[in-house]
Amino acid sequence: MTARVLDGKATAAALREEIASEVSRWTDAGGPVPTLAAVLVGEDPASQIYVRSKERACGKVGMASRLIRRPAETTTDELLQLLADLNADSQINGILVQLPLPSGIDSQRVLDAVSPLKDVDAFAPENVGLLVQGRPRYLPCTPHGIMQILARYEFDLVGEHVVIVGRSNIVGKPLANMLLQRDIGFGAKMANATVTVCHSQSRDLAAITRTADVLVAAAGRPRLITADMVKMGAVVVDVGMNRSEDKLVGDVDYQAVSEVAAAITPVPGGIGPLTIAMLLRNTLTACKHQNA
Ligand code: NAD
């Protein structure tokens, strides 16, 4: 079997087109231009690239962005003040704090200071709680991207066994919550899955992953998932983005697993582009909520 490649770049482009039309309908009707503020602290090269691509993506769909740079020596209190200002600024609809923050800063306090109404990453406890209860305000970007690509390739998740490797607050846990819902809305409806979440302490990982109809790898371990861990005909989603010998590699042994799986997302060009598209979606939603 040679797996069908699920094209995240093309799916993200289609999503961006839909968002762009919605933005122009909104502004034509007199709505303000949705605006995202990105807070970048320090000089981390990868963070600079990520923030720049988020800004570019805003421009492509007719949204505005405001990049706020602060030096690595900025204190937690100074960032809390900055966030209070952004929370109060009616021209800003969404706020993202680019992670990781420099080591001297209390990241949790800073993230907690983003208003839940402007929390387009959906990290705030209030937004996590709403998602768990099945009435999300914003959907977390990477898990939402995964749901969108599966929906757009018409995989029916109802009753399927989805195994997620990784239990982070950014990917594994929110994805599990979304997959359990009957309907998460936002056009990615086909949830209702049976979900197993594995982590670094799970015993006999391979025995669990082999039972997956859909296997999601989000562990941050290069090529952790080998062909013998995948059921014949499974759908494999590789969220991993790991630097190895100056190349970007996923958590899945792509070549070997492609011989076993029915479908697979590549790295790069899989889930990465979808994450940014879903950030744009949340910024538009935020703008509409704030100007209803
Ligand atoms: P994390 O380090 O916060 O969490 C990793 C999780 O994997 C942990 O729960 C850990 O228990 C589990 N894990 C680690 N080693 C394991 C093993 N050997 N067996 C089973 N479980 C194991 O990471 P994260 O932030 O969730 O990110 C995971 C990966 O996804 C990283 O490579 C990251 O770069 C990537 N990522 C990609 C996107 C994207 O847009 N494509 C977005 C977020 C994260």
Image (spheres, rainbow, N blue to C red):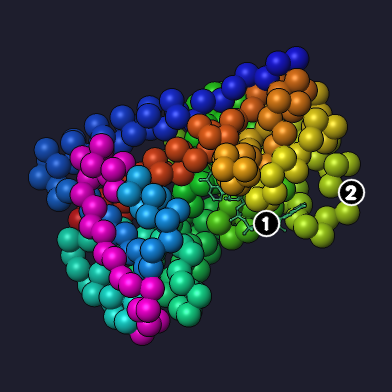
Q: Which residues are magenta?
A: 55-77
Q: Position of residue 75 (x, y in %)?
A: 38, 82
Give the residue at mark 1: 167
Q: Position of residue 171 (x, y in %)?
A: 58, 52
Q: Is residue 69 magenta?
A: yes
Give the residue at mark 2: 204
Q: Residue at x 15, y 50 (%)?
A: 32
Residue placed farthest to the top in the image?
1
- Left or right: where does residue 150 sit relative to residue 109? right
Q: Position of residue 109 (x, y in %)?
A: 46, 78
- Look at label 2 and name its amino acid: Asp
Disc 1 is placed on an element classified as: loop
Tell which of 261 and 269 is nearer to you: 269
Count numbered badges in the picture: 2
| Residue 78 falls in image quadrant | bottom left
Does residue 86 sit above or below 38 in this rendering?
below
| Disc 2 residue crowd, few under 14, some 14–19, many 20+, Cα 10 Å | few
Q: Are marks 2 and 1 in contact (CB under 8 Å)?
A: no
Disc 2 is placed on an element classified as: loop
Q: Is residue 177 magenta?
A: no
Q: Is mark 2 within 8 Å of ligand 1?
A: no
Q: Position of residue 163 (x, y in %)?
A: 73, 43
Q: Residue at x 20, y 68 (%)?
A: 89
